[in-house]
Amino acid sequence: MTRSGFLAAVERRRPDRWALGAVIAVFIGFAVAYTRITPIGASPDELSHLHYMTGISDHLQLPPAGEPERQQPPLYYLLGAVVAKLTGDDARLIRLLSVVLGVLTILTVYAVARRLFPHRPALAVGAAALVALLPETQYLAGAINDDNVAWLAGALLVLAGVVAVQSDLLTPRLALGSGLAVALAVLAKETVWILALLLLALVAVRFARQIRAMSAVLLLVPTMVLAGWWFVRNAVEFGSPLPPLHPITAQRQVFDSFAQVRGYVAATALSIVGMYGNGAHLVGISILGVRPLPSTVAIAAIGVITVAACIAVARSWGRWDTVRRRVAAILLAVLLVAVAQSVLNSATFDLQPQARYLLVAVAAAAPITAWTIGWRRTGGLSPLRGSAIAVLVVVALVLDVSGLITAAHTTA
């Protein structure tokens, strides 16, 4: 490439990068604000997560039987233990680890969308913005909570899956990258384990005739080396590869009747733009401190986007090649897996109508949503659609500010 061609390419990319930087800056600003205004222990199970970390940093010990969060894989807590050691167990500084993981998740979502829409960088920025501007992601990125590393692991699994579908050869780099993504997921949280299995199945089917001994080693050994010790430790400590599960409350509650559907859906939808109390109590966002956001608004917004996405896919399907159709199928599978495991967990273990468990699939949901909002059959965006997108950004920022106001009033 000539110098003039290189400079032209840089100029084309610059607005994209500046916009992404602005999105990340806004996210960091709100997330760091939450680290300061939210009392320690006010976010979901934060004291239990903190105790897990300090047990490692102070005593080099994972949680024994009877300790909360003992069932959680150790990656987030190992990282947090390093931060705790460096900061003298300052919980507010330890929270900054979650901010960093949130930024990495946003960047990974951006990378997924760039792979999906290589000629429409604005859609990639839009997908990143959808993650960055959610009050839910900002709030939990300002807390000590392992969902942050689970979201990153889920996003990396989606990225690896998209790369695999778009590739013709199983290169050593692709095999190792997929293996490392699976290893990270295994060490992150159980909510991404099924997605990790989905990636392994995808690679095995996609490259069935290309897999050799070295490819299998690169796919499987990272998990065995990086995560195997944890399963061995569990077998010694608890007599099984996995620690016993720890219910959220002493009185077990499960999703056991269709009469609960409306409340379950409403609470889950609201939690996307909601504020959490400690563990179970959800405080709805008050719009600029005036009135709570109705759950029906959140349900309606999700419903409209879902219907619009289905219509856009149906109208575009005939023009897509085989690779695009396979990518669409993979993204849909990721969304269905996230929803199914959240419902099954609430039906069999603990009733948890919380959208944070669904955000392991955010790298599939955000690009689909951005594409749906910016969808056009031919040509550029109409002035009406461009204005609507601008309004959505303003609404998102109003919700972000309202989240901080609600948090400040709730903890006052």
Image (cartoon, grey):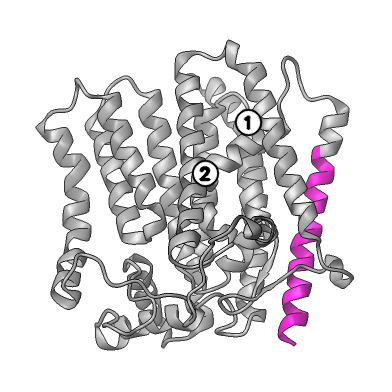
Q: Does residue 65 appear left or right of residue 304 in this picture? A: left
Residue 91 in view, yes or no: yes
Which kind of residue does numbered mark 1 sit on? Glu
Mark 1 or 2, closer to the camera: 2
Q: Residue at x 53, y 66 (%)?
A: 351
Image-quadrant location for residue 294: bottom right
The image shows residue 389, relative to residue 348, as above or below, that is: above
Identify the image quadrant of the C terminus: bottom right
Q: Position of residue 331 (x, y in %)?
A: 49, 35
The image shows residue 108, relative to residue 285, as above or below, that is: above
Residue 28 in view, yes or no: no
Please tell me which of labels 1 and 2 falls first in the chain.
Answer: 1
Residue lying furthest left = 213
Q: Quick one: 376 or 129, which is closer to the camera? A: 376
Question: Label 2: which residue?
Answer: 363
Residue 11 badge: 1
Q: Quick one: 79 or 266, which is closer to the camera? A: 266
Asked if residue 405 is among those painted magenta in the image, a careful observer would answer: yes
Q: Position of residue 309 (x, y in %)?
A: 66, 31
Asked if residue 262 is among those painted magenta in the image, a careful observer would answer: no
Which kind of residue does numbered mark 2 sit on? Ala
The image shows residue 397, relative to residue 274, as above or below, that is: above
Q: Label 2: state its secondary structure.
A: helix
